Image (cartoon, rainbow, N blue to C red):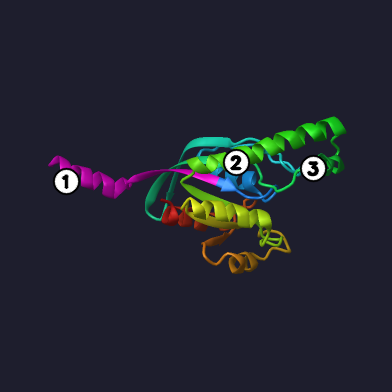
Amino acid sequence: MPFKKLLGWVKKIFGKRKKIRLGLYGPPNAGKTTLANKISMDWTGTPVGEVSEVPHETREVQKKEHVIVKASGKTLEMNLLDMPGIATKIDYEDFLEFGLDVTEARARAKEATKGVIEAIKWLEHVDTALVVMDAGKDPYTQVNITIIGNLEARNIPVIIVANKIDLKDADAERIQEAFPQHPVVAVSGKTGKNITKLYDTIAKHSK
């Protein structure tokens, strides 16, 4: 069999592998790490990071490389980048109600502020972005608008994830109405509901 014909046959069967850096952005406690863990567990069997109810549990970029995802007839090799939560204001007093003492709260606030700066710097290294929002909260916030605006300015494909649809007050349609210019996928990172649809959307819109 001629080499070119053989190569075409191999590509047809196995698909052409595409490599992307997938950044997960959003406000604190939107479920970014839970979603990143779900994606990683599905395709590698290992999680990305720890999850906590305390805001800003993720205070530096967490990476999971060589995540091979097969969706919509494509094979994607993804480097998952779980970003620290973006916030316009980080006050150490907000952590006191979660049981941290003043010293711990001040340290966490300082680290969280550095994490926001790091997440913004990583915009230069992202090929596609998942903007994760809590479907039970108002999506039209300064943080969400700022994140999406920065991604649009860099021509980075944006997929909005309406997360936590397993909760009673979830309303994914409200997110779609707020940002009609981007694809919105309603999922539950916790239960895995609609996760296959998310993989298909990533395969379709990634560059």
Q: Residues within 10 Å of mark 3 (few under 14, many from 20)?
A: some
Which tag, 2 or 3, sits closer to the chain's start? 3
Q: Which picture quadrant has residue 173?
A: bottom right
Q: Is residue 132 above or below residue 1?
A: below
Q: In this rendered view, identify the residue nearer to me: 148 or 12.
A: 148
Mark number for residue 91? 3
> Can residue 43 be seen at all in this image of the molecule?
no
Mark number for residue 5? 1
Residue under the image location 52 percent in, 65 percent down: 181
> Can residue 51 be seen at all in this image of the molecule?
yes
- From this viewpoint, which residue is outermost toward the front? 153
The stretch in magenta equals 1-23
Kindly identify the amino acid type of the residue bearing the numbered disc 3. Answer: Asp
Q: Is residue 183 above or below residue 38?
A: below
Indicate the position of residue 130 as horizontal and vertical percent values: 55, 51
- From this viewpoint, which residue is outermost toward the left? 2
Kindly identify the amino acid type of the residue bearing the numbered disc 2. Answer: Ala
- Marks 2 and 3, how far apart in space? 18 Å
Say if mark 3 contacts mark 1, CB within 8 Å: no
